[in-house]
Structure formats: structure tokens, C-alpha cells
Image (cartoon, helix red, strand yellow):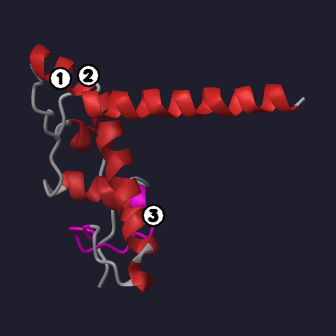
Amino acid sequence: MSEQHDTMMYPTIEELLGRTDSKFRLVTLGALRACQINSYFGQLGEGLGAMVPPQVLTMSRKPLSIAFEEIASDKIIATDPPEVTEEEALADSMIPTGEANLEQADLDDAGADGADLDSAS
């Protein structure tokens, strides 16, 4: 026998807001998880198995409703990303010298091609 809910929306907004620290985090968490669920259902026939299936038993067919039910049952919990130090951010933004040399070689080749086109005219 299926369970009946008192409201049109289950779980209620109040219950969901109690699971996160802000409504913005709730919206972001729900949207991200709904995209994952949608991708999971989309790749089912392909046999890839890389995505995590829904973590709750539900009669709902909509990814966002399933995501909210997962949040309400504490199967999905928002976490903060690890903090990145200024040195790590700077190191990630720098181009290694090998790649810089490749880019310069590409520019030199493009210049040579351009010179050939001008002299052929």
C-alpha cells in the first residue's frame, strides 16, 4: 500500500531547510544531485555504471523529487569543498614550461604559414 502525504510537495520545504544551512545550498545540492540522477537514468542502457543510482526507494519519477527525498532521508549531505591555499591556487594557474614551449612552436608555425600565404599572392 502506498504512503499518502498531507501536502502536494513531499518532503516539505521546512523539513528540507532543516537539513542544510541555507536555502541556496538546498537548491544547489538538489539541482546537482538531480543532474546526477538524470545522468544515471540516461546511461542505464549503455552499461557504463559510473553514476550513483538513487539512494531511496520512491514512486517518484522526477529526478529533482528523488533528490529532495534523498536529502530528507540524510542520504545526501552537503559538504564544503576543501580549502585551497594561495600557493596551491597560484601553482594550478601557472603553465608548465613544456606547454609554454609547445604554444610558442604553434605560434611560430602559424607565422610561417602566414608568410607563405603572403608571398604566394
Q: Tell me if label 1 and label 3 are in contact, CB under 8 Å.
A: no
Rounded to the nearest whole Å, what is the CA distance between mark 3 and mark 2?
Answer: 42 Å
Q: Which mark is residue 55?
A: none
* Residue 42, horizontal then vertical, whole percent: 46, 72
Residue 27 position in % (x across, y down): 35, 38
Q: Are marks 2 and 1 in contact (CB under 8 Å)?
A: yes
Q: Which residue is mark 3?
A: 62
Query: SS of the residue at dot 3?
Result: loop
Which residue position holds label 1? 91
Label 1 vs label 3: CA separation? 42 Å
Magenta-drawn segment: 52-64
Front residue of 70/10: it is 70
Whether the magenta-drawn stretch holds residue 60 is answered as yes
The quarter of the displayed image where residue 57 is located: bottom left
Q: Secondary structure at mark 2?
A: loop
Q: Nearer the viewer, mark 1 or mark 3?
A: 1
Give the residue type at disc 2: Met
Q: Nearer the viewer, mark 3 or mark 2?
A: 2
Left or right side of 70 for 105? right
Going by the numbered disc 1, the residue's amino acid type is Ala
Residue on which the image places disc 2? 94
Neighbourhood count class around disc 2 (C-alpha, 10 Å): few under 14, some 14–19, many 20 upward: few
Image point (35%, 84%), residue name: 47
Mark 1, other Cα within 10 Å: few <14 / some 14–19 / many ≥20 = few
Of mark 1 and mark 3, the one earlier in the sequence is: 3
Relative horizontal placement of residue 95, taking residue 108 as reference (left or right): left
